Image (spheres, rainbow, N blue to C red):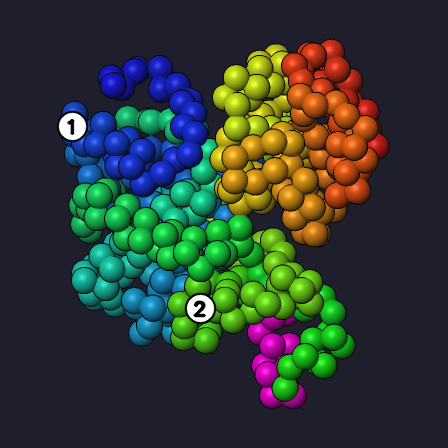
Amino acid sequence: MAIEQNYPLIPIKEFTSVKQAGLFEILKQPRFSGQLILSDPSKQEWIFHIYMGRLMYATGGTHPVRRWRRNLLIHCPQTSAQLSSLQDDLANTNWEDVNVCWDYHLLCLWVDLHKVTRDQAIKMIQSVMVEILFDVTQGMQITYQIKPDSSSSSFFKPLVLIDAEQVIHEADQLWEAWQSARVADRFPNRAPIIRQPEQLRVKTSPQAYQTMTKLLNGQYTLRDLAILMKRDTRAVTLSILPHLQSGLVELIDIPDLPAPVSLPPNETSVKTVPEQKPLIACVDDSPLICQSMEKILTSEGYRFVAINDALRAIATLLATKPELIFLDLVMPNANGYEICGQLRRLSFFRNTPIVILTGNDGIIDRVRAKMVGSSDFMSKPINPEEVLKVIIKHLKQVN
């Protein structure tokens, strides 16, 4: 696979560890230097900085500052307690460099000032990359773009050059453990919050309830809690899973923390983002149906995500947060009724339009689909005019 000079956006479905390794191998062979930019349908973006085909650093995602602070606390605890001195460290810093990647630049500066050891910095860089690759894997559908940059070697002073296979393997092990614990549809960057305090008080001991009210307050993500409780993220998630399943506790999205450095304003901070059309998802094991849907919707300017694996449907939908879902009724391993019912039990999807797709347009199917919370029912083969009509109808109701 040749690297083209116009740097196109290239989609990859089910961005598994095998596909990740293949992509990084493509960049390794020509000793590529620059950036590999990954994004998901929700426009979340991760950036891998590469020098001569090997990894130097990675950043981006939902919570870059939270991630940086967590890993600083783990690997550089002596520096974590001195964050108030950051401005002094940056007094003579090139602001342009800091705007590009303040976290890496600061780590390099601290190594030079002997505030952290090189070994500590390397462990932190590796840990950050593993966490990002975990999030990329959970996101499933990824678009990538490469940006060759001859200045990488001058801007970045490589603290370490890491083979991608090393961090991919570690992230894959974490992802497999997360799946085996049956929490693949829970996102570690979300924060638990108590929704039904009185019911939770009845079901727990006074001491446990007091602890939970302090920790499950919507201020700390599952990963943050793991650091506070000195446990791994999977164990923390499993400990509150019964309360999540019963609806007493809910996972919510929370903002990132402010950056620990005061960055000067720059042109990119005032750019206006063009309004985007809604994201539409299609859950169907038939690639042909998904391809047809994609052609219909993208031609009208809608963003689109296809999900062919029913078992990973809910996790992918939570990651991408579509504004309308087309859902096949009959699929291997799971059916549309089950998935629709599970989605309606999640607060985020309680009001999301869900349109059932089926080749069997019977009255029993229609009634059952309505009972599990579907918004509409559409027969196959799909008709472009009918698809667009249904979207306009239900998105108007939502808005």
Residue 390, position as x, y percentages in the image: 77, 22
Left or right of residue 204, residue 198 in this image:
right
Residue 317 drawn at (x, y percent): 58, 40
Q: Does 190 appear above or below 6?
A: below
Depth order, front residue of 22/87 = 22
Q: Residue at x 19, y 43 (%)?
A: 163
Type of the residue with mark 2: Ala
**Res 79 visible:** no
- The residue at the point 57 percent across, 15 percent down is 292
Of the numbered discs 2 and 1, the one sitting upstream in the chain is 1
10 Å crowding of disc 2: few (<14), some (14-19), many (20+): some
| Residue assigned mark 2 | 235
- Residue 330, can we see it? yes
Q: Is residue 25 left or right of residue 320?
A: left
- Rendering coords of residue 279 (x, y %): 63, 30
Taking 364 as reference, is 6 above or below it?
A: above
Callout 1: few (<14), some (14-19), or many (20+) C-alpha neighbours within 10 Å? few
User: What amino acid is at disc 1?
Assistant: Gln
Q: Which residue is pictured at 45% across the width and 45% down the height?
A: 138
Residue on which the image places disc 1? 29
Q: Does the magenta run of residues contain 366?
A: no
Give residue 81's position: percent from left, percent from top. 39, 74
Q: Nearer the viewer, mark 2 or mark 1?
A: 2
Observer-nearest residue: 313 or 222?
313
Query: Which residues, given as a range, are shown in magenta?
Result: 206-219
The answer for how far apart the CA atoms under marks 2 and 1 are is 39 Å
Occupied quadrant, residue 2: top left
